[in-house]
Amino acid sequence: MRIANLLLAALFATGGAMPAAARPVPVPKVAKAIGADTLFWSQVQKEMGFPHMERQFPVHVVKRGRRVSPLRKGRPLDFPALVDGKPSTVDAFMLANHTAGILVVQDGKIRMEKYGLGYGPTGRWTSFSVAKSFTSTLVGAAIKDGYIKSIDDPVTRYIPGLKGSAYEGVSVKQLLTMTSGVKWNESYTDPKSDVARLFSDTPDPDTDSTVSYMRKLPREAEPGTKWVYKTGETNLIGVLVTSATHKTLANYLSEKLWKPYGMEQDAVWMVDGRGQESGGCCISVSLHDYARMGEFILGGGKVHGPNGTRSILPDGWVEAATHKQQEIGLPGHGYGYQWWTRDDGTVDAQGIFGQDIHIDPKRRLVIVVSSAWPVASDRAHWAGFEALFDSAAKAVDAEGATKGS
């Protein structure tokens, strides 16, 4: 039986009288690996499934440590939001956008925390492509640790299975910036697109699933000359980190960030049929720990422990990763090392269906949003998020102006 049918059966068992997320029903782990089914889930399935992906797919656990880095309560921050282009409240914005949680943190203090869809601070929510920013951070850590020599190295040095493919001559940096020149279709509505087929096609024997698929793709441009968003390439980055470190992404993330930074809860990361985490997708994290990831980036990639403060990333890595490396054809926006950039200096880790870690260095502000949009992605929804973030920034600026007067 397909996952979708099981989820619908669970809904019918409740009588359909309440939103599914408000009455969570245990779902058997029926999938053997990550699949594209989630792209085509109904609204009910999303709201039931997004907070419980580990019940439906195999995962690796990103283990937390004994120490928790506190997020203290700060003075409440109130700001308006736009709904259908009209000024409204954040609560109305959440309802209109099927948002499960919003957390606003400034200087390590919680200024706003709201939940919906039956979600709460002790839960986890899937990230979709927010995971890309975690994976790229692990590349930096692997360079700092000496596992990867340079982002200018050829990808084939770490993934020999790509030799002779369109990835011959592509550098690690070109994977990080999505400029390999390899042809790819990222459509979330086409079941025959590359992103939908990535884990549905049967992989070659004794070959990583992502490598098996990606090495068959054709080249459409010279490496470094064309930006195209490709989830499959971030999966390759994940394979590269695993190959270089000889550690799972989950274990390496736990070692480098989750334990030393003081994350509050274990995270879970979905894996494919051969046990490799999807570097481009699907780590499930609590709202508080997504915010801590933003705080970690704001702090320049440093962790604090009994032996003092240390950086787990190379000098200059955060600045390079979170600044525009490539134009993406959208004025005022760009792409770094798996981070979305804006010319105003803010940066985002974004995932389909409304997942975001928004980082505003100027205001020392981190805003996390977890959602279940009816659509995977469109410009109108992202514009609504940007308006929300800008509204929060204006509220912070207004506070500063009042204090200074």
Image (spheres, rainbow, N blue to C red):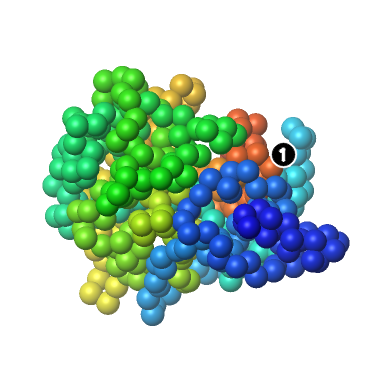
Q: Position of residue 135 (x, y in %)?
A: 35, 51
Q: Is residue 189 above or below residue 289?
A: above
Q: Residue furthest bottom?
A: 66
Residue neighbourhood size for the residue with mark 1, other residues' Cα within 10 Å, grouped as few (<14), some (14–19), many (≥20): some
Q: Nearer the viewer, residue 142 or 1?
A: 1
The residue singled out by tag 1 in the image is 82
Which residue is depicted at the point 33% across and 25% down?
218
Quick check: can you spot residue 170? yes
Q: Position of residue 41 (x, y in %)?
A: 65, 48
Quick check: can you spot residue 394? no
Which residue is depicted at the point 43% across and 25% down?
328
Q: Position of residue 80 (x, y in %)?
A: 71, 45
Q: Nearer the viewer, residue 11 or 61?
A: 11
Q: Relative to 33, is 219 on the left or the right?
A: left
> Is disc 1 placed on a helix, strand or loop?
strand
Which residue is depicted at the point 42% across and 68% down?
61
Q: Relative to 392, is 231 on the left or the right?
A: left
What kind of residue is marked 1?
Answer: Leu
